[in-house]
Structures are given as C-alpha cells and as structure tokens.
Amino acid sequence: MLPGPNETTSGHGGAEHHGRPDEDNFPDYTRTSRSHVGESIEDTRNWPGIILVGLGLVGLGLTLTAAGYGFEGWALIGGITTVVCLVVGFAWVILEHRRVKNKEGRGLSDPAGH
C-alpha cells in the first residue's frame, strides 16, 4: 500500500500499533502533521456541545419562522431556548478543547496544529 500524503516511507505505517494498550493513539502523529485533526469526532466528550449548537441553529430557524407568522409566545420561548442551547453548546466545546490542551501542557490560545 502506498503511503498517504503525510506519511513517511520509513518506519511503521501506524497500523502496527493498533491494539497495543500501552500506547495512546490520539493524536496519530504517524499520519498527520497537525496535532488535533479530527479532535471533535475522536473525543466523544465534544458531542453534546456540538449537538447543542446544532439544536440552537435549528431553534433559530424555528424562532424566526414563529416570529414571522406572528406567534409572539412561541417566538419568545424559541428565542430563550435558542440562546441557552447556543451558549451552553459553545461553552461545552470550548471547555472540552481547553481540557485537551491542558492535558498536553498548552494553553487554549497557543498556536499549534490549527
């Protein structure tokens, strides 16, 4: 098999250490030069925050629709729910990203990877 664009031709291709419990395979330095590629998908603790942001965006559309049709009560409820979902979702993702960076000994704003 040919190496990928970020793989070296010497050493192991990354598949040889799958199943070895003594090695942490995140991030996979053998196949990427960036330190956090796929972090949001690999780290499942981000998922509730991502889902809340998605629900907030859907809620924004529903709130604007309710306001456009003149349903003030539903627009108010939808607006409050949208703001709560977006704020909690973004906070969740940022706090989780900060936890991952602290685990590596870096600050949230340290330039590395992205």
Image (tube, grey):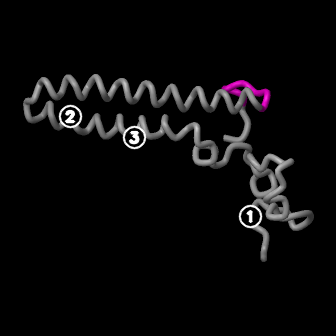
Q: CA distance from mark 1 to mark 2?
A: 45 Å
**What residue did someone put label 2 on?**
64
**Mark closer to the observer (2, 3):** 3
Q: At label 1, which amino acid type do we have?
A: Pro
Quarter of the image for residue 7 reads bottom right
- For residue 54, which numbered disc appears in the image? 3
Circle 1: element type: loop
Query: Residue at 28% across / 34% down in the picture?
Result: 60
Quarter of the image for residue 95 reads top right
Q: Position of residue 19 (x, y in %)?
A: 80, 58
Q: Is residue 105 magenta?
A: yes
Q: CA distance from mark 2 to mark 3?
A: 16 Å
On screen, 40 above or below 8? Answer: above
Q: CA distance from mark 3 to mark 1?
A: 32 Å
Quadrant showing the C terminus:
top right
Circle 3: element type: helix
- For residue 5, which numbered disc appears in the image? 1
Out of 24 and 79, give the one closest to the viewer.
Answer: 24
Asked whether, in this view, residue 77 is left or right of residue 12, the answer is left
On screen, 107 above or below 32? Answer: above
Task: Name which of mark 1 and mark 2 comes first in the sequence.
Answer: 1
Circle 2: element type: helix
Q: At label 2, which amino acid type do we have?
A: Leu
Q: Position of residue 73 (x, y in %)?
A: 13, 24
